[in-house]
Amino acid sequence: MTHGHPLTLTPKLAPSLPNLTSRAEFESFREEAERQWSSYSTPDAWVVTVGLDSSSIGKGAGDVLARVREQLAGTDAVVRQASGNGANWMEPWVEIKRPGQPPIVYANIEPSDVPDLLADRLGHRAIGVIGDAPYGDIPPLQELPFFKLQKRILLRNVGVIDPESIEDAIARGAYSGYMKVLFDLSQDEVIEEVTRANLRGRGGAGFPAGIKWASGKRARARPKYVVCNSHEGEPNVYKDRRIHEGDPHRLLEGILIACVAVGADIGYNYIGGEYPLAIQRFRKAAADAERLGLIGKNVLGSGKDVGLRIRAGGGAYICGEGSALMYSIMGVRGQPRTKPPRSVEEGLWKRPTVANNSETLANIPDIVNNGGDWYASMGTGKSTGTKLVTVMGPVKRMGLVEVEMGTPFRRVIEDIWGGMKDGHTFKGVQTGGISAGPLLEQHLDVPLDFDSMAEYGGMLGSGGFVVYDDTTCAVDYARYMMAFNRYESCSKCVPCRLGNPAIIEIIDRIRLGRGSEADLALIERTSKHIIELSLCGLGQVAPMPLLGMMQKHHEEFLEHVRDGVCRCGTCPIESRVTAVAAD
Amino acid sequence: MSHPSSQTIDLDVVREMMSHITYADHQEGQELILFALQEINEHFGWVSLEAAEIVADHLGTTVNRVYALLTFYADFRTAPRGDNFMLVCHGMSCYVAGSMRLVQSLRDRHGVSDGETTADGALTIQVVDGCLGICDRAPLVKLNQEFHGELTVETLNDLIGRLRLATSSGGAR
């Protein structure tokens, strides 16, 4: 796969950045950045912002920005880039703040629309105003159904700041938590705040970050490491990409705080190789921060050393598993190992390693700034804070949102995503990526949190959901997910390596109309072997989506094996007679 | 810009690339094997055995070790690609949106399956069983450096048709 990262290890540095050596110098840098930032919102300001990230660039946002630059050359207008704001359905969008007006957002702008847009002839395409009050008949953007139910903490700056500008990020509060951790708080106080926040791991397992950090700090071997897991191979999840492309400094600050809090020498960020722009923007962020003096020896004269290394993945799903990821960093095949020892005892290079998901670490700056109690006040008792969620499939609006934990799932699908597209009928929603079963219509009132979905055989996981309609055959869909697991199995242990292909053989028999009810029992028996005997998280959950599908759409499986009928017409079923004759 | 279609790998360029990759100790050297291979794969579209030997020499390891990585990670190719390279995303959003039809059409109309190159050498396809992460535009392919989303069998065929035209008139990319 092509990555597009530059030949040299360090990207081009912004030559204007000073090297800061004390907290006071940082504060004056911040004041200057804030002055610059507030100049964008003075009444006379004329600012045009275009949202650029991997999905909007593919829709022509880069050309839109180029046309805007070309048209406004030689004027007083400031032309900026931001990243997409999560609302993929309105991309490419352009935000225009004209003198004497609030910023107005225009949706779905093509490059050819730019002249009309800038001449203010596209008033009917305006969909929202930034701010609390409507402007004329244009409502505030945050009142739109897509935004109204959201609680944007992690996404606060996404689509607002230029992700390639450290000044923008600092003006909006980046590294203020890091300053506290460097100068005001002890390591234990930081860990205490994270523990009080009850921040649970966002990668899917939901392990409390505070406990992990405390045992990381207790570990005595040196050096110690922090590893940020930004390898989201899980299909249809792109929350980490959104953070990297939209607000890389937030994540970087989280990693740096984790390093100081647990006393780690080096923080690693392992980014999935599928995301060239995310890698590029994070590299830029890290290079700028290093240039400013926020990474390195004796940071800002605090006496603390923090190092950072960025590593890119090679397209292996299994490298999202903690131990496999560390092997991959060490330059060997990413294959999981047995635990214990846990990675906080023996992780990267056999040293104590605190491994967190990037969404988890991106929460840290706000927890340090506002306190653990503030964070714990959001969400439900056991699942605090917010969660980044994607819902894909035939739904009306596309995007990625941040909702408070405990929001009813039905409201998320129906209000934020606008329900099913016209002409599509809801059949179910696959949960937990490919690690759990689906939910049906009657389960949708379940709150979105770590524990509630398990009751119905679902899982929050990393927050990726796929809605499927009645044209999707449950058997075929289950086969797809099993084929994914077969392909992505690292081949280390036998139950997963041989069990998954064996199950696919059985499903293929069923899809051809040659199955029998005994095959369903055989699937369950084989699944049990895989679940109980596999070594890592991938193997132990590999048959879960299939079992979930079998349970939720039992009738459909029975129709396949008993009557030789695929109600969706997807499966290549031969009629009973020919099947018998062929045998 | 990269040349995903190089049939041969200029080893002097590989050595030049390696000279930019410096490391403080053996540990960091090992961490950079994957990175070095990614750079070569990105630049030439594949990694040859000779290039792998240079990487091994530069980073103080064996070629066996390097080849073990090349054959484990899905992003790497150990044989040259066609003039153009297309990743067909087969993640779950793309599956639900009909990526299987795209894969079938590539096989039926253009005679290429996962990992194969068309007879005229114009196009190599690779089906991504993971996810390219641009799920909101499913079903999606990445052709050379660009993403093309919301595809149907017809728009995919148009895309390939335009590509063939551009390639045969000598103006590839």
Image (cartoon, rainbow, N blue to C red):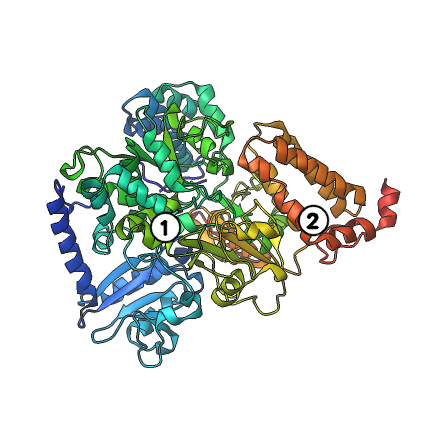
Q: Is residue A367 above or below residue B60?
A: below
* Snapshot quadrant of residue A67: bottom left
> Percent position (x, y) of residue A378?
39, 57
Q: Are marks 2 and 1 on the same chain?
A: yes
Residue drawn 63% across and 65% down? A425
Chain at numbered mark 1:
A
Residue beneath disc 2: A550
Residue beneath disc 1: A243
The reply to whether residue A521 is in sight is yes
Residue drawn 19% across and 32% down? A297
Chain at numbered mark 2:
A
Disc marking residue B69: none
Residue drawn 67% across and 38% down? A527
> Percent position (x, y) of residue A547?
66, 45
B156, A59: nearer the viewer? A59
Q: Is residue A148 above or below residue B11?
A: below
B23, B140: nearer the viewer? B23
The reply to whether residue B102 is in sight is no
> Percent position (x, y) of residue A117?
32, 72
> Mark 2 belongs to which amino acid?
Met
Task: Give neighbour class at mark 1: few <14, some 14-19, many 20+ (Cα, 10 Å).
Answer: many
> Which element is circle 1 on?
helix
> Which element is circle 2 on?
helix
Mark 2 and mark 1: span between their CA atoms?
36 Å
Q: Earlier in the sequence, mark 2 or mark 1?
A: 1
